[in-house]
Amino acid sequence: MITTTRRTWLTGATAASLIPGTLRHARAQTGPIKIGFLGPLSGPAQIVGMELRVGAETARDLINRQGGIGGRQIEITFADDRGDPNMTISGAHELAGQGANLVLGMALLSSIMALLPQLQSLNMLIQINGATDERLSHELFNRNMFITTPNNVIRQGALAEMVAAKYPDVTGWVCAIQDSAQSRSSWARFGKSLSAAYEQKRGKILKLEDPLTAKVGATDFKPLISQLAASPAKGLFHSLVGSDGVSFFQQARAFGLDKKFTVIAENALDMDLPKALKRSMPDNVYSLSFWSPNVTPNDPRGQELTKAYAAATKDPYPHGLAALGYVSLQLYAEAIRQTGSTDPARIIPALETMKFDTIRGLGFFRKEDHQFLATTCVVHFTAAQTEAGWGVESVTAVDDASMVNPATPGIPIAM
């Protein structure tokens, strides 16, 4: 199911509300309820960890202002792994030693894979907040891991479905991606989903060109831009991460490349692109996002997250990663309310069977493979005559359950 919200401009919001508390309170105990945060709070991936941290702290503060859980306050214990898998292991042992066995903030695949073999021995439960690799719910499945992030199948399916619905005549596609396994997988997933949407629903055959790649950390994108300019395709899939992606768009604009394509399906930059380009933002880019406040602008929880984000970062436009941190803390809190415990042995079956009202919509963990299903957003950012220099033309919310792959934990997923 697809729902589109149109022409809503982001503004700083000023409302606060309780997270809905329909579940029974945890039985009376003493002392704070400890939740662990393990992720990159410094180093090259610091921005990822800090976005997640703001979201988790906002959810914690909301709950604590309203009396906590069964009268107990939530306390987040932070462990900075600096994006180093070796420090992930030491950080996990540190958290376990402090009794923080319910952990969020896990965003980097290398760190997650390093920790997976030790989860049971540490009696630790983790939530994934950022990594989209579909192997986590398949050949890497671990019962002590829950994937709160929509995986690559869901994300590319949502982007492809929106593009096919809005641009049914754009049947030639090329890509600009990083020379990495993750980017190639994203292009393959997008192409597969887009082909199905065009061929099965519209009777049209797509032409998908071979991948055009750039090295991670590249600064000169002119060779890639020249190849793209020579392509007859009218659709562009983009998956250059971070500053690489922003530099690509800045250089591409100088060559008029943004005008060549009818539509650009953007996989990697989310809100970072319009924040960087401002009034130079092209009007034909549709970006994947974990969340946008424009989906449910009247939700007081989203308004509170926007307010807290602005206070913490001096930026009134919250990143989708902040929503993942918020939702993960909320999910743990509601499972603790339900069970009256922080023991992973009791929290796991609670998470497997509960439904949650979140800022990403009504959601649940699929019991078989622990993939969380709610909604994924595709945002149409545009330049605007506002102080920020950009706005949100529309947001398309796609139901994750309509896009997700079958649950086959322990078995490699077919490409």
Image: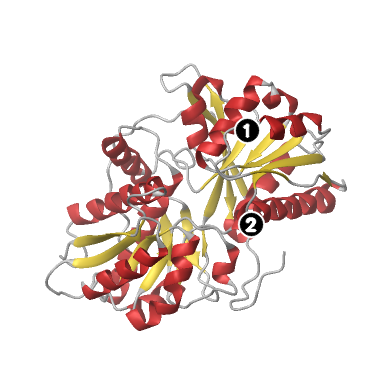
Residue most toward the top?
A: 385
Q: At 15% across and 74% down in the image, what residue appears?
A: 28
Tell which circle, 2 or 1, labels the residue nearer the N-terminal end: 2
Q: CA distance from mark 2 to mark 1?
A: 24 Å
Above or below for 130 versus 169 = below
Question: Is label 2 in a helix, a strand or a loop?
Answer: helix
Residue 313, x across and y down, in percent: 31, 37
Above or below for 69 versus 323 = below
Left/right of residue 5 with respect to residue 124 in the rendered view? right
Q: At 31% across and 42% down in the image, what residue appears?
A: 304
Q: Considering depth in this image, is 215 or 233 the residue closer to the camera? A: 215
Above or below for 4 versus 19 = above
As drawn, the label of residue 285 is 1
* Three-letter residue code for mark 2: Ala
As drawn, the label of residue 2 is none
Residue 382, x across and y down, in percent: 56, 26
Left/right of residue 70 with respect to residue 127 in the rendered view? left
Residue 292, x across and y down, in percent: 47, 41
Residue position marked by numbered label 2 in the rendering: 181
Q: Is residue 5 visible?
A: no
* Three-letter residue code for mark 1: Val
Which of the two discs, 2 and 1, sits closer to the camera?
Answer: 2
